[in-house]
Amino acid sequence: MSLSDSSEAELYTGREILSVLGLRRGGVRLVSCPRCGRAGFDVHGFLAKNQDRLMRLSRDITVAVMGCVVNGPGEARNADIGITGAGGRVILFKRGEILKTLDEAEAEEAFWEELEKL
Ligand code: SF4
């Protein structure tokens, strides 16, 4: 893999390719939004803070981090745990169910609390 980005980004991309091809099992599969004007939740800020911690987990889970209600609820519902922006709030999903609607400032702590219980 060679990207015009950090070594971590190259590793994460390589891992994702292997997972999609069925050549790698285990670890977190991350579904998240590209940069998008519709995002009401700071997906990229959240992942900048949390992606390394997520990628170190050996659990075989899918995590969705989504910006808005266009595709966010669908992706978050299909994940083991997901968060999505919804207006000025954030909705936390776990295995298909809505758990909580939160302020963005509360989202990170609630996300990790629920992920640890999976
Ligand atoms: S879910 Fe919303 S923020 Fe994410 S890519 Fe789609 S429209 Fe953009």
Image: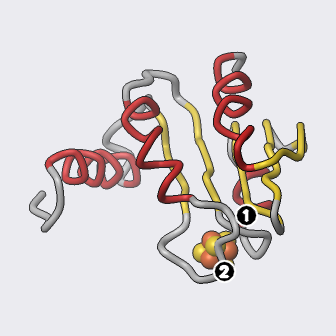
Specify whether tag 1 is near ligand 1 (CB below 8 Å). yes
Residue in the foreground of this view, choosing between 3 and 19? 3
**Residue at the top extreme?**
117
33 relative to 61, above or below: below
Side of 62 relative to 74 (left or right): left
Ligand 1 occupies quarter: bottom right
User: What type is the residue that disc 2 sits on?
Assistant: Arg
Side of 91 relative to 1 (left or right): right
Q: Residue at x 64, y 37 (%)?
A: 108
Q: Residue at x 52, y 28 (%)?
A: 60
Specify whether tag 2 is near ligand 1 (CB below 8 Å). yes
Helix, strand or loop at mark 1: helix
Which residue matches tag 2? Answer: 38
Tell me the quadrant of the picture where the N terminus can be found: bottom left
Q: Residue at x 37, y 35 (%)?
A: 52
C-alpha gap between disc 2 and disc 1 = 11 Å
Q: Residue at x 38, y 46 (%)?
A: 19
Q: Quadrant of residue 88?
A: bottom right
Q: Position of residue 6 (x, y in %)?
A: 17, 53
Q: Nearer the viewer, mark 2 or mark 1?
A: 2
Residue 72: mark: 1
